[in-house]
Amino acid sequence: MSKGSDSPVLCVDIGGTSTKAGVLDAAGELHLIESIRTRPDTESYIRNLSELVANVRTRATDQGFEISGIGVAMAGFLNAERDRLLYNSNLSWLEGFPLRQRLAQGFDLPIEMEIDSNAACMAEYHFGSGRGSQRFLCVTCGTGLGVGMTIDGVPLRFAYGCLGDIGHIIVDRSGPLCTCGGYGCAEIMISAPVLANRYAAQIGTNASLRTVIEAAQAGDSIAVSILREAGEWLGIAIASMANTLFPDHIAIAGGLSAAGDLVLKPAEEIFRHSAGVFARTNVTLTRAVLGSSATLIGAAWPFWNSYTAREKNREPD
Ligand SMILES: [Zn+2]
């Protein structure tokens, strides 16, 4: 962010289960965070979303923030104008809905939409682990496996506003059916619900990814081995990404990264073993630092003036 010159931005992060909103100040600090459930009923959801944004804006105004715009990050592919969701199997009821236009009716502010993986990547690039990187790849491992890349501070967009769905890189030809309809994708091998279910099946009770991580940290060998295996699949996936995209820095973000070395060590071992020599010797692999706030922070990035100008310069007319 061009420090000090940008006004606060009202940020929204629309995920498959919850929607968060808050205010990002010029120093990269989040304030006034509120959230609602993401309910699969378009009209009532839009009403709730508008109320959420209105609430945060009112509180922001009361506290002296002069909001310059609304940045909305969402999971899924966007159309070329970036004003609506084109595809997300978890948010199919929002597909094609003119979201930017509908939100604009209630607020006299510019609204920009961005894909969540790009938003997280841009946040880490500006305020986190990607600072100073020229070709920064950010891999967010949560319910899905979201991957964003920025080249000189501009998100790489091949198709549908993003890098492509690189989390669905295939790592096991005999792997299980993935949510995308393919088989053996990295995402289905390491997604949070899959790991939680794998652990639950072995211990005979319900579990979440957090449960697995806490159990592994306490020395539970089943949990440790589930996380090690997830790290290995992740390592294969990022080796292929490095061979293809030649990042100089890869950051691992998302809920799975909270497991620290239990996941990152096996990931790095497999990565260093599998990736091509040129790719692996020119890349640093680290854990992301902004945690679960990265996407919300990065939702504001289209309002970071100097960088938006750079992207506009690159886009063909
Ligand atoms: Zn897939």
Image (cartoon, helix red, strand yellow):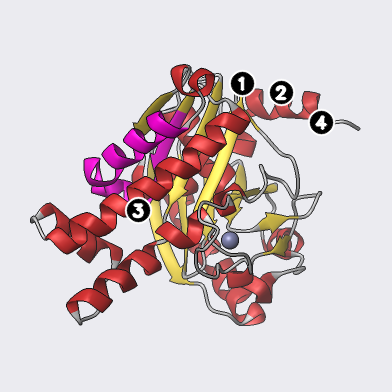
User: Disc 2 marks which amino acid?
Assistant: Arg
**How far across and down, in percent of the image, does residue 221 sit?**
13, 59
Tell me the tag on residue 152: 1
Mark 1 or 3, which is nearer the eye? 3
Distance from the alpha carbon under mark 1 to that under mark 3: 31 Å
Tell me the tag on residue 230: 3
Q: Is disc 3 placed on a helix, strand or loop?
A: helix
Query: Would you place residue 84 above or below residue 69 in this image?
Result: below
Q: Which residue, given by chain and number where applicable, does mark 2 sit on? A: 310
Q: Earlier in the sequence, mark 2 or mark 4?
A: 2
> Local crowd at mark 1 within 10 Å, few (<14), some, or many (≥20)?
some
- Closest to the observer, 39 or 267: 267
Mark 3 or 4, which is nearer the eye? 3
Q: Is residue 90 magenta?
A: no
Mark 1 or 2, which is nearer the eye? 1
Distance from the alpha carbon under mark 2 to that under mark 4: 9 Å
- Closest to the observer, 164 or 277: 277
User: Disc 4 marks which amino acid?
Assistant: Glu
The overriding secondary structure of the stretch rendered in magenta is helix
**How far across and down, in percent of the image, does residue 305 sit?**
65, 27
Distance from the alpha carbon under mark 1 to that under mark 2: 9 Å
Q: Quadrant of residue 183?
A: bottom right
Q: Is residue 256 magenta?
A: yes
Q: Earlier in the sequence, mark 3 or mark 2?
A: 3
User: Disc 3 marks which amino acid?
Assistant: Ala
> Local crowd at mark 4 within 10 Å, few (<14), some, or many (≥20)?
few
Confirm if mark 1 falls within 8 A of ligand 1. Answer: no
Q: Which residue, given by chain and number where applicable, does mark 4 sit on? A: 315
Instruction: Answer whether labels 3 and 4 touch (C-beta < 8 Å).
Output: no
- Give the extent of the magenta segment: 250-274
Q: Quadrant of the C terminus?
A: top right
> Local crowd at mark 3 within 10 Å, few (<14), some, or many (≥20)?
many
